Amino acid sequence: MHKFPVIAWAALILLGVSGAYAEEGFPGRPQYPDVEIIELPDLYSQLDKVAIIDVRSEYEYETLRIKNAINIPVARTSFSKDIRNIRAVTNKPLVFYCNGHTCMKSYKAARKAKLAKVPSCYAFDAGVFDWAKAYPKDTELLGKELRDASRLISGKKFTAHQLGPKEFAKRVGPSNMVIDVRDSFQRAAVGLFPFEEKWIPLSQKGRLADHIDRAKRNGKTLLIYDEVGKQVRWLQYRLEQAGVKKYYFMKGGASAYIDSI
Protein backbone atom coordinates (compact mmCIF):
# COMPACT_ATOMS: atom_id res chain seq x y z
CA MET A 1 0.00 0.00 0.00
CA HIS A 2 1.40 3.38 -0.93
CA LYS A 3 1.53 5.87 1.93
CA PHE A 4 1.82 9.62 1.58
CA PRO A 5 5.50 9.89 0.59
CA VAL A 6 8.13 12.54 1.12
CA ILE A 7 7.58 14.95 -1.79
CA ALA A 8 9.71 17.88 -2.88
CA TRP A 9 7.54 20.26 -4.82
CA ALA A 10 8.95 23.77 -5.21
CA ALA A 11 10.42 23.70 -1.70
CA LEU A 12 7.29 22.00 -0.34
CA ILE A 13 7.99 18.91 1.74
CA LEU A 14 5.14 16.71 2.83
CA LEU A 15 5.91 14.01 5.35
CA GLY A 16 4.09 10.70 5.41
CA VAL A 17 3.73 8.37 8.35
CA SER A 18 4.26 4.66 8.06
CA GLY A 19 2.69 2.48 10.68
CA ALA A 20 0.84 5.28 12.45
CA TYR A 21 -2.43 3.73 11.43
CA ALA A 22 -2.92 0.05 10.76
CA GLU A 23 -4.52 -0.78 7.44
CA GLU A 24 -7.05 -2.90 9.27
CA GLY A 25 -10.29 -0.98 9.48
CA PHE A 26 -9.76 0.42 5.98
CA PRO A 27 -11.30 -2.19 3.65
CA GLY A 28 -10.75 0.02 0.62
CA ARG A 29 -6.96 0.05 0.87
CA PRO A 30 -6.44 -3.51 -0.43
CA GLN A 31 -9.02 -2.83 -3.16
CA TYR A 32 -7.20 0.30 -4.36
CA PRO A 33 -3.49 -0.57 -3.95
CA ASP A 34 -2.50 2.04 -6.55
CA VAL A 35 -3.98 4.92 -4.52
CA GLU A 36 -1.64 6.85 -2.26
CA ILE A 37 -2.90 7.68 1.23
CA ILE A 38 -2.44 10.63 3.55
CA GLU A 39 -3.07 9.96 7.24
CA LEU A 40 -4.98 12.20 9.63
CA PRO A 41 -2.08 13.92 11.47
CA ASP A 42 -0.16 14.49 8.24
CA LEU A 43 -3.07 16.22 6.58
CA TYR A 44 -3.52 18.49 9.57
CA SER A 45 0.16 19.41 9.74
CA GLN A 46 0.22 20.29 6.02
CA LEU A 47 -3.23 21.85 5.83
CA ASP A 48 -2.09 25.06 4.14
CA LYS A 49 0.07 23.22 1.64
CA VAL A 50 -2.57 21.03 0.00
CA ALA A 51 -5.88 21.54 -1.81
CA ILE A 52 -8.65 19.57 -0.12
CA ILE A 53 -11.50 18.26 -2.24
CA ASP A 54 -14.72 16.84 -0.83
CA VAL A 55 -15.96 14.24 -3.33
CA ARG A 56 -19.34 13.54 -1.68
CA SER A 57 -22.73 14.89 -2.68
CA GLU A 58 -23.52 18.57 -2.33
CA TYR A 59 -25.96 17.79 0.50
CA GLU A 60 -23.33 15.96 2.54
CA TYR A 61 -20.80 18.71 1.86
CA GLU A 62 -23.18 21.43 2.99
CA THR A 63 -23.92 19.54 6.19
CA LEU A 64 -20.44 18.64 7.46
CA ARG A 65 -17.11 19.40 5.81
CA ILE A 66 -13.44 20.12 6.35
CA LYS A 67 -12.94 23.87 6.52
CA ASN A 68 -11.96 25.42 3.17
CA ALA A 69 -12.59 22.19 1.24
CA ILE A 70 -14.13 22.54 -2.19
CA ASN A 71 -16.90 20.24 -3.41
CA ILE A 72 -16.42 18.21 -6.58
CA PRO A 73 -18.61 15.09 -6.34
CA VAL A 74 -16.88 12.05 -7.78
CA ALA A 75 -20.24 11.00 -9.28
CA ARG A 76 -20.32 14.14 -11.42
CA THR A 77 -19.81 13.35 -15.10
CA SER A 78 -17.39 16.27 -15.43
CA PHE A 79 -15.26 15.13 -12.46
CA SER A 80 -12.07 14.43 -14.41
CA LYS A 81 -12.36 17.70 -16.33
CA ASP A 82 -13.00 19.62 -13.11
CA ILE A 83 -9.93 18.09 -11.46
CA ARG A 84 -7.75 18.98 -14.46
CA ASN A 85 -9.04 22.55 -14.15
CA ILE A 86 -8.04 22.59 -10.47
CA ARG A 87 -4.58 21.33 -11.35
CA ALA A 88 -4.25 24.09 -13.95
CA VAL A 89 -4.49 26.77 -11.26
CA THR A 90 -2.53 25.16 -8.40
CA ASN A 91 0.59 23.07 -7.95
CA LYS A 92 -0.51 21.90 -4.51
CA PRO A 93 -1.08 18.18 -3.95
CA LEU A 94 -4.79 17.35 -4.22
CA VAL A 95 -6.34 15.47 -1.31
CA PHE A 96 -9.71 13.77 -1.77
CA TYR A 97 -11.96 12.75 1.12
CA CYS A 98 -15.40 11.30 1.75
CA ASN A 99 -17.22 10.02 4.86
CA GLY A 100 -14.85 7.55 6.46
CA HIS A 101 -13.19 4.17 6.69
CA THR A 102 -15.71 2.19 4.66
CA CYS A 103 -16.45 4.90 2.09
CA MET A 104 -14.85 4.21 -1.29
CA LYS A 105 -15.35 7.61 -2.90
CA SER A 106 -11.96 9.06 -1.90
CA TYR A 107 -10.17 6.11 -3.52
CA LYS A 108 -12.32 6.29 -6.64
CA ALA A 109 -11.61 10.02 -6.94
CA ALA A 110 -7.84 9.55 -6.59
CA ARG A 111 -7.87 6.77 -9.17
CA LYS A 112 -9.97 8.82 -11.60
CA ALA A 113 -7.56 11.73 -11.21
CA LYS A 114 -4.63 9.42 -11.88
CA LEU A 115 -6.29 8.06 -15.03
CA ALA A 116 -6.90 11.67 -16.10
CA LYS A 117 -3.11 12.23 -15.89
CA VAL A 118 -3.41 14.59 -12.92
CA PRO A 119 -0.28 14.19 -10.75
CA SER A 120 0.12 14.25 -6.96
CA CYS A 121 -3.32 13.16 -5.84
CA TYR A 122 -4.04 11.41 -2.54
CA ALA A 123 -6.92 9.89 -0.61
CA PHE A 124 -7.65 10.92 2.95
CA ASP A 125 -9.60 7.78 3.70
CA ALA A 126 -10.09 8.38 7.44
CA GLY A 127 -12.80 10.76 6.26
CA VAL A 128 -14.75 13.72 7.54
CA PHE A 129 -15.98 12.12 10.79
CA ASP A 130 -12.49 11.28 12.06
CA TRP A 131 -11.37 14.75 11.05
CA ALA A 132 -14.30 16.44 12.82
CA LYS A 133 -13.66 14.54 16.04
CA ALA A 134 -9.95 15.37 16.01
CA TYR A 135 -10.07 18.95 14.71
CA PRO A 136 -13.52 20.49 15.32
CA LYS A 137 -12.20 24.04 14.91
CA ASP A 138 -11.18 23.17 11.36
CA THR A 139 -14.57 21.63 10.59
CA GLU A 140 -17.80 23.29 9.49
CA LEU A 141 -21.24 22.00 10.49
CA LEU A 142 -24.17 23.51 8.59
CA GLY A 143 -21.95 26.36 7.42
CA LYS A 144 -20.52 27.28 10.83
CA GLU A 145 -17.43 26.24 12.78
CA LEU A 146 -18.10 23.00 14.64
CA ARG A 147 -15.88 24.00 17.60
CA ASP A 148 -16.96 21.10 19.80
CA ALA A 149 -16.99 17.50 18.57
CA SER A 150 -19.78 16.69 21.03
CA ARG A 151 -22.14 18.46 18.60
CA LEU A 152 -21.75 15.55 16.20
CA ILE A 153 -24.70 13.19 16.26
CA SER A 154 -23.64 9.92 17.84
CA GLY A 155 -24.28 6.52 16.36
CA LYS A 156 -26.44 5.78 19.38
CA LYS A 157 -28.70 8.76 18.70
CA PHE A 158 -28.95 7.85 15.04
CA THR A 159 -29.90 4.29 15.92
CA ALA A 160 -32.56 5.56 18.34
CA HIS A 161 -34.35 7.14 15.37
CA GLN A 162 -34.31 4.03 13.20
CA LEU A 163 -37.10 1.53 12.60
CA GLY A 164 -36.80 -1.81 10.87
CA PRO A 165 -38.57 -1.98 7.48
CA LYS A 166 -41.61 -3.87 8.80
CA GLU A 167 -42.10 -1.60 11.81
CA PHE A 168 -41.64 1.44 9.57
CA ALA A 169 -44.33 0.14 7.20
CA LYS A 170 -46.76 -0.41 10.08
CA ARG A 171 -46.60 3.28 10.95
CA VAL A 172 -47.42 4.50 7.46
CA GLY A 173 -50.78 6.26 7.59
CA PRO A 174 -52.59 9.61 7.66
CA SER A 175 -51.28 10.57 11.11
CA ASN A 176 -47.69 10.48 9.86
CA MET A 177 -45.82 11.97 6.89
CA VAL A 178 -43.76 9.59 4.76
CA ILE A 179 -40.96 11.04 2.62
CA ASP A 180 -38.80 9.23 0.09
CA VAL A 181 -35.56 11.24 -0.23
CA ARG A 182 -33.93 9.11 -2.94
CA ASP A 183 -32.81 10.72 -6.17
CA SER A 184 -34.50 9.89 -9.46
CA PHE A 185 -31.86 7.31 -10.43
CA GLN A 186 -32.23 5.39 -7.15
CA ARG A 187 -36.01 5.61 -7.13
CA ALA A 188 -36.53 4.60 -10.76
CA ALA A 189 -40.02 6.18 -10.61
CA VAL A 190 -41.23 3.69 -8.01
CA GLY A 191 -42.00 4.53 -4.37
CA LEU A 192 -42.51 1.99 -1.61
CA PHE A 193 -45.81 3.41 -0.40
CA PRO A 194 -47.89 4.65 -3.37
CA PHE A 195 -50.44 7.38 -2.58
CA GLU A 196 -49.17 7.59 1.00
CA GLU A 197 -45.75 9.17 0.56
CA LYS A 198 -44.11 12.26 -0.84
CA TRP A 199 -41.05 12.05 -3.07
CA ILE A 200 -38.63 14.85 -2.24
CA PRO A 201 -34.97 14.20 -3.15
CA LEU A 202 -32.37 15.58 -0.75
CA SER A 203 -31.25 17.94 -3.52
CA GLN A 204 -34.59 19.80 -3.22
CA LYS A 205 -33.57 21.40 0.04
CA GLY A 206 -36.18 24.17 0.10
CA ARG A 207 -39.12 21.88 -0.64
CA LEU A 208 -37.87 19.33 1.88
CA ALA A 209 -37.54 22.02 4.57
CA ASP A 210 -41.12 23.19 3.87
CA HIS A 211 -42.55 19.69 4.36
CA ILE A 212 -40.52 19.11 7.50
CA ASP A 213 -41.88 22.37 8.92
CA ARG A 214 -45.43 21.38 7.91
CA ALA A 215 -45.14 18.03 9.67
CA LYS A 216 -43.80 19.73 12.79
CA ARG A 217 -46.62 22.31 12.85
CA ASN A 218 -49.28 19.63 12.33
CA GLY A 219 -47.87 17.32 14.98
CA LYS A 220 -47.13 14.53 12.49
CA THR A 221 -44.32 12.04 12.87
CA LEU A 222 -41.91 12.07 9.95
CA LEU A 223 -41.09 8.69 8.43
CA ILE A 224 -38.15 9.11 6.06
CA TYR A 225 -36.27 6.63 3.95
CA ASP A 226 -33.43 6.61 1.40
CA GLU A 227 -31.83 3.83 -0.63
CA VAL A 228 -29.62 2.05 1.93
CA GLY A 229 -30.15 3.96 5.17
CA LYS A 230 -27.01 6.13 5.07
CA GLN A 231 -27.96 9.43 3.41
CA VAL A 232 -30.61 10.12 6.05
CA ARG A 233 -27.88 10.50 8.64
CA TRP A 234 -27.04 13.86 7.08
CA LEU A 235 -30.69 14.88 7.10
CA GLN A 236 -30.78 14.19 10.84
CA TYR A 237 -28.62 17.26 11.48
CA ARG A 238 -31.18 19.47 9.77
CA LEU A 239 -34.07 17.86 11.61
CA GLU A 240 -32.34 18.47 14.92
CA GLN A 241 -31.50 22.04 13.92
CA ALA A 242 -35.19 22.61 13.10
CA GLY A 243 -36.21 21.28 16.52
CA VAL A 244 -38.07 18.27 15.12
CA LYS A 245 -38.55 15.57 17.77
CA LYS A 246 -40.87 13.08 16.09
CA TYR A 247 -39.02 11.41 13.24
CA TYR A 248 -37.78 7.97 12.22
CA PHE A 249 -35.64 6.58 9.43
CA MET A 250 -35.98 3.18 7.80
CA LYS A 251 -33.04 1.03 8.82
CA GLY A 252 -31.30 -0.18 5.69
CA GLY A 253 -33.49 1.99 3.49
CA ALA A 254 -35.54 0.89 0.48
CA SER A 255 -33.10 -1.95 -0.27
CA ALA A 256 -33.74 -3.54 3.13
CA TYR A 257 -37.49 -3.11 2.71
CA ILE A 258 -37.48 -4.88 -0.65
CA ASP A 259 -35.34 -7.70 0.78
CA SER A 260 -37.83 -8.12 3.63
CA ILE A 261 -40.84 -8.65 1.39
Image: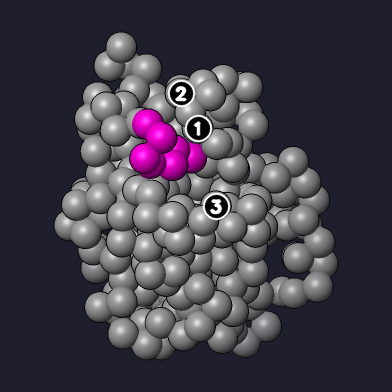
Q: Which mark is residue 193?
A: 2
Residue 131 in view = no
Q: In the picture provided, is 203 more to the left or to the right than 123?
A: right
Query: Horizontal and vertical percent for residue 58?
Result: 61, 57
Residue visible at 50% across and 73% down in the picture: 142
Say whether marks 1 and 2 touch (CB < 8 Å).
Answer: yes
Q: In the picture provided, is 250 more to the left or to the right than 62?
A: left
Alpha carbon separation for disc pair 1 and 2: 6 Å
219 w.r.t. 181: above or below:
below
* Residue topped by disc 1: 197
* Residue topped by disc 3: 211
- State which quadrant residue 170 falls in: top left
12 w.r.t. 169: above or below:
below
Query: Horizontal and vertical percent for residue 88?
Result: 82, 67
In the image, 117 versus 64, the foreground residue is 64
- State which quadrant residue 90 falls in: bottom right
- State which quadrant residue 139 falls in: bottom left
Which residue type does callout 1 highlight? Answer: Glu
Residue 239 in view = yes
Residue visible at 48% across and 28% down in the picture: 196
Which residue type does callout 2 highlight? Answer: Phe
Q: Which residues lie in the magenta part?
A: 173-179
Q: Earlier in the sequence, mark 2 or mark 3?
A: 2
Query: Horizontal and vertical percent for residue 157?
Result: 21, 59
Q: How many marks?
A: 3
Q: Secondary structure at mark 1?
A: strand
Q: Residues within 10 Å of mark 3 (few under 14, many from 20)?
A: some
Q: Secondary structure at mark 3?
A: helix
Alpha carbon separation for disc pair 2 and 3: 17 Å
Q: Residues within 10 Å of mark 1 (few under 14, many from 20)?
A: some
